């Protein structure tokens, strides 16, 4: 009887907790909806003020603060609008909005909130301080970043520092702290670094010349899509770096610049001890139309890395009739992985080019078909490609 009573009590307690949880969820939903309605109301209330600010950004006048005494949520609506514009605008427009945030007391309030014991409040304050480009917040943000273990707050802090920093040393210190946790976040760190309003070319030079390989990797990742002629000499040096990851990333970037590669440079890259470097070199040779590299690419079909073999076969297929003939020879006289890689690429080429309808592409297909039949014979009638005869005869095999 006692155990049954205990069981009933336990069930009632569980039901009570469930009911309490449901009530809390409803309360949170109601509060959220109320906040959304109030935000919409305040946005409409300050519509004329927002229009005034936008209209006077380009004029040499001092912008007025929002009229009247603002409630807490009302301030947040105005602040969020300013931050939205700061992200969109640059130059004098952005500077005016940043100063307006400072004069309105938004920066000072969030600096106080950054000292809060509540995690959520600190997170929101860090985000807003970065959005307002509050340079006075950088020392405190750096201090918090250094003391905390790596977490989602670390990313928010780092991004805010990148936005607010007014010198490259603060930015480099932030990157060192962020990478000191040993996490594989070089791509994320590069994305954060590019949030800065500082001269990116000068920062990239510092990163690529740094003794810390982690910072060098961030610099290499950040260079993708960036036209920075000043860093090309440094990039050429990093192609021969000792660390495999740095060397591989540097080679990828170097080859995308379409350099005039010397024969000894090609041979060095194709014999590198890192398969990533060999694979990237093999991929680039086809895009650079380096017909003189056909023997090297043919030999690379025997590479221990499938990626090197795949890229080598693909590049051979891009090097016209001579490259395709080298594939056919490898498929006919080669053995094992070399023959397999060549046959696979030949099959892809023949299927892909058969589908083309342009005259030039049909002619190219028929030439490769002739080479194919010369090496492997005609086991079945080749499919005639229509339309070629009209420009000088039937070139199909």
Image: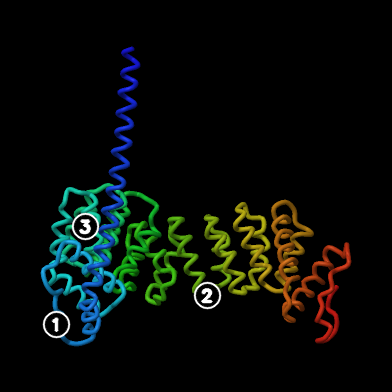
**The image quarter in which residue 220 lies:** bottom left
Q: Nearer the viewer, mark 1 or mark 3?
A: 1
Q: CA distance from mark 2 to mark 1?
A: 50 Å
Comparing labels 2 and 3, the label whose residue is closer to the camera: 3
Which residue corresponds to the image point at 32% horizontal and 30% vertical from the top-left?
14
What residue is rendered at 11% in x and 72% in y? Answer: 68
Which residue is labeled 1 in the image?
62
Q: Secondary structure at mark 3?
A: helix
Question: On the rendered structure, is 297 left or right of 214?
Answer: right
Above or below, comparing residue 165 to residue 186 in the picture: below
Q: Which residue is mark 2?
A: 258
Q: Position of residue 142 (x, y in %)?
A: 21, 57
The image quadrant that residue 100 belongs to is bottom left
Indicate left or right for 318 with 121 as reference.
right
Q: Are marks 1 and 3 in contact (CB under 8 Å)?
A: no
- As helix, strand or loop, the secondary structure at mark 2 comes to loop
**Can you tell which quarter of the image residue 165 is in?**
bottom left
Are the residues at dot 2 and dot 3 in contact (C-beta closer than 8 Å)?
Answer: no
Question: Is residue 128 in sight in this rendering?
Answer: yes
Residue, far top:
1
Query: Residue 357: horizontal and vertical position, in percent?
Result: 73, 77
Q: Where is mark 3, residue-wise?
A: 142
Q: Can residue 132 be seen in this snapshot? A: no
The residues bearing labels 1 and 3 have C-alpha atoms spaced at a distance of 32 Å
């Amino acid at each position: 009887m006692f155990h049954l009573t205990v069981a009933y009590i336990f069930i009632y307690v569980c039901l009570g907790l469930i009911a309490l949880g449901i009530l809390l969820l409803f309360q949170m939903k109601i509060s959220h909806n109320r906040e959304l309605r109030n935000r919409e109301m305040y946005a409409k209330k300050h519509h004329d003020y927002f229009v005034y600010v936008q209209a006077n950004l380009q004029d040499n006048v001092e912008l007025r603060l929002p009229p009247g005494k603002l409630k807490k949520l009302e301030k947040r609506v105005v602040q969020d609008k300013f931050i939205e514009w700061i992200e969109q605008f640059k130059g004098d427009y952005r500077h005016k909005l940043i100063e307006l945030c400072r004069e309105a007391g938004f920066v000072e309030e969030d600096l106080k909130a950054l000292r809060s014991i509540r995690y959520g409040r600190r997170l929101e304050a860090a985000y807003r301080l970065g959005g307002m480009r509050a340079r006075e917040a950088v020392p405190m943000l750096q201090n918090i970043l250094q003391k905390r273990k790596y977490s989602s707050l670390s990313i928010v802090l780092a991004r805010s520092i990148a936005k607010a920093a007014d010198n490259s040393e603060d930015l480099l210190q932030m990157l060192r702290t962020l990478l000191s946790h040993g996490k594989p976040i070089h791509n994320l760190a590069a994305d954060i670094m590019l949030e800065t309003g500082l001269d990116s070319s000068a920062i990239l030079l510092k990163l690529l010349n740094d003794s810390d390989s982690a910072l060098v990797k961030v610099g290499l990742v950040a260079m993708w899509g960036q036209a920075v002629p000043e860093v090309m000499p440094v990039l050429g040096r990093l192609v021969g770096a000792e660390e495999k990851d740095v060397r591989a990333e540097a080679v990828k970037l170097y080859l995308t610049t379409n350099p005039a590669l010397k024969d000894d440079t090609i041979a060095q890259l194709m014999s590198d001890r890192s398969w990533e470097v060999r694979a990237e070199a093999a991929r680039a040779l086809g895009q650079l139309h380096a017909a003189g590299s056909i023997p090297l690419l043919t030999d690379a079909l025997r590479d221990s890395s499938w990626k090197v073999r795949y890229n080598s076969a693909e590049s051979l297929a891009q090097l016209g009739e001579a490259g395709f003939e080298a594939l056919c020879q490898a498929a006919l006289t080669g053995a094992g992985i070399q023959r397999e890689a060549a046959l696979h690429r030949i099959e892809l080429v023949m299927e892909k080019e058969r589908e083309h309808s342009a005259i030039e592409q049909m002619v190219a297909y028929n030439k490769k078909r002739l080479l194919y039949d010369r090496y492997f014979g005609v086991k079945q009638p080749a499919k005639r490609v229509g339309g070629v005869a009209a420009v000088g005869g039937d070139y199909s095999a």
